[in-house]
């Protein structure tokens, strides 16, 4: 019996020493980074060997070259600033518009019951499908990007404000 216990303890100690390097957080992170690098290398190789059409999928080295040149001339930061400004502006307008409409619907139960099916229908439309229409209507400038952000946020804000007002304690 004592011999069996010693053998099982030895086996357990040997097994604990043979732990896999990927059991640690650093090992898993290294494996994940290696997988991403391998993916990009395979992609680059597939484009260079013309297994993939470079016009359709691009080339990682080409993207990296453009990224470096945009960082060098500062245009990446300027363009990112414009995009963040447009997104925040659209989010702010969409949130205010949706919240005001949602609270208005809460105030009038008759109007809320009347427009609920239309709100559900508008909410079910894939928002990315609106992008070409909005670009045709407003062009490619600031207005179209803000309008797209408004369309993305206003329905969500409307539904959230309406439900929150409806669920609020009436004794407050």
Image (cartoon, rainbow, N blue to C red):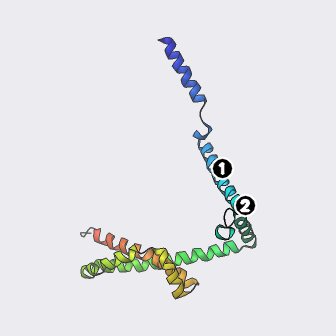
- Mark yes or no: residue 117 visible: yes
Comparing 50 with 39, the one in front is 50
- Percent of width and height locating residue 88: 53, 75
Q: Is residue 53 left or right of residue 153?
A: right
Give whichever of 61, 77 is nearer the camera: 61
Query: Which numbered marker is on residue 143?
Result: none
Point 67% across, 67% down: residue: 53
Question: Where residue 32 sits: x, y (%)?
Answer: 61, 50
Dots 2, 1 in contact, CB < 8 A = no
- Label 1, residues with CA under 10 Å away: few <14, some 14-19, many ≥20: few
Location of the C terminus (image quadrant): bottom left
Give the residue displayed 33% in from the left and 77% down from the top. 103
| Residue at the image position 71 percent from the left and 58 percent from the top | 45
Placement of 44 over or under 8, stated as above or below: below
Quick one: label 2, few (<14), some, or many (20+) residues within 10 Å?
few
Residue 16 is situated, as x and y percent measured from the top left of the image, at 57, 29
Res 109 → quadrant: bottom left
Residue 44 relative to residue 130: left or right: right
Q: State the mark number for residue 34.
A: 1
Secondary structure beneath dot 1 equals: helix
Q: Earlier in the sequence, mark 2 or mark 1?
A: 1
What secondary structure is marked by label 2? loop
Whether residue 92 can be seen here:
no
Q: CA distance from mark 2 to mark 1?
A: 22 Å
From the image, tell me which residue sits under label 2. 49
Q: Looking at the picture, tell me which residue is in the foreground, 53 or 112.
A: 53
Where residue 20 appears, x then y in whole percent?
60, 36
- Count the marks: 2
Would you say 78 lies left or right of 152 here?
Answer: right
Mark toward the viewer: 2 or 1: 2
């Amino acid at each position: 019996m004592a011999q069996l216990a010693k053998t099982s303890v030895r086996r357990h100690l040997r097994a604990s020493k043979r732990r896999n390097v990927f059991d640690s957080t650093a090992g898993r992170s290294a494996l994940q980074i290696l997988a991403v690098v391998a993916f990009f290398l395979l992609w680059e190789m597939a484009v260079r060997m013309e297994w993939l059409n470079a016009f359709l999928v691009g080339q990682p080295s080409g993207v990296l070259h453009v990224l470096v040149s945009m960082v060098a001339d500062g245009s990446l930061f300027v363009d990112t600033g414009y995009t963040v400004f447009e997104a925040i502006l659209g989010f702010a307008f969409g949130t205010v518009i949706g919240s005001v409409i949602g609270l208005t619907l809460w105030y009038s139960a008759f109007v809320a019951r009347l427009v609920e099916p239309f709100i559900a229908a508008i909410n079910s439309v894939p928002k990315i499908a609106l992008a070409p229409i909005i670009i045709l209507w407003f062009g490619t400038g600031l207005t179209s990007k803000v309008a797209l952000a408004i369309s993305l946020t206003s329905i969500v804000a409307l539904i959230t404000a309406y439900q929150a007002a409806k669920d609020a304690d009436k004794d407050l």
